[in-house]
Amino acid sequence: NGYKNLESLLGKDRIPVPNGDEDEEGWQRWYQAAGRPEKPEEYDFKRPDLPEGMPYDDDTEKAFRTWAHINGLSKKQAQNLFDGYAKTQMERHVAYATTQKQAVATAEQALRREYGNQYEQAVAQAKSALATYADPDYIKHLEETGQGNDPRVIRAWIKVGKEMGGDTKLAGAVQAKPQAQDIDKAIGDFR
C-alpha cells in the first residue's frame, strides 16, 4: 500500500516551492504552473456594463494586466480582481452622481426660497452673464466639477447679471420686473 501511494505521488507533476523571495526562476516556474499566461496581453477581461456618464479607462485596464502578470495571477484570479475593482468603481460613480443630483436639488431649493418669485429671472441673468463673460473652459470646469451647482457660485453670477442688467452689452439679459414699492415710489414722484 505504501509503495503504491509513493508511486502515485511521484508520478504526479510536482512543482518545487521557490527557495525564497529572491528565487526569481522558481517563482516564474510556480506562476506558470498556477496558470499565469505567458504575456500580460493574454488576460481576457470582460468589460462591465458601465452606468451612464462613466467612461471606460483603457489605461487602467492595461496597467491592471501588467500588475496581474507581475504578481503571477491566473486568468481566473485576475478576472475576479478586475470584476471586484470595476464593481467598486461603478458603485462609487453611482454614489457620486446621486450626491451631485441631491446637491443640485438642495441648491435650487435654497435659491428658490431666497429669491422667491424672482428666481427664474435671477437664474436667467446669471446664465446671460456666464455666457457673456466666462470662457468655455471655465464653463466646462463648472459642469465637470459640479461647482456650477454651488449656491455661492450661482449667487455670484446672479450678482454679475444684475449689475450688468442695464448694460446693452449683455445680450439676452432679462429686464427686472417692477416691484410694488417701485411702482408706489414712481406714483409718489409723479404726484
Image (cartoon, rainbow, N blue to C red):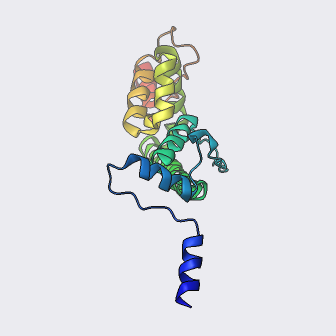
As drawn, the residue found furthest toward the top would be: 169
When asked about the image quadrant of residue 150, the answer is top left
The residue that appears at 38% across and 28% down in the rendered structure is 156
**Image-based side of 114 in relation to 42, left or right:** left
**Image-based side of 18 in relation to 74, left or right:** left
- Is 180 or 113 nearer to us in this picture? 113
Q: Quadrant of the C terminus?
A: top left
When asked about the image quadrant of residue 172, the answer is top right
Does residue 182 sit above or below 53 in this rendering? above
Does residue 2 sit above or below 107 in this rendering? below
How far across and how far down the image is residue 54, in percent?
59, 42
Q: Using the rendered image of the protein, determine whether residue 138 is visible from the camera's viewpoint.
A: yes
The residue that appears at 59% across and 48% down in the rendered structure is 37
How far across and how far down the image is residue 67, in percent?
47, 44
As drawn, the residue found furthest toward the bottom would be: 1
The residue that appears at 51% across and 46% down in the rendered structure is 69
Q: Using the rendered image of the protein, determine whether residue 129 is visible from the camera's viewpoint.
A: no
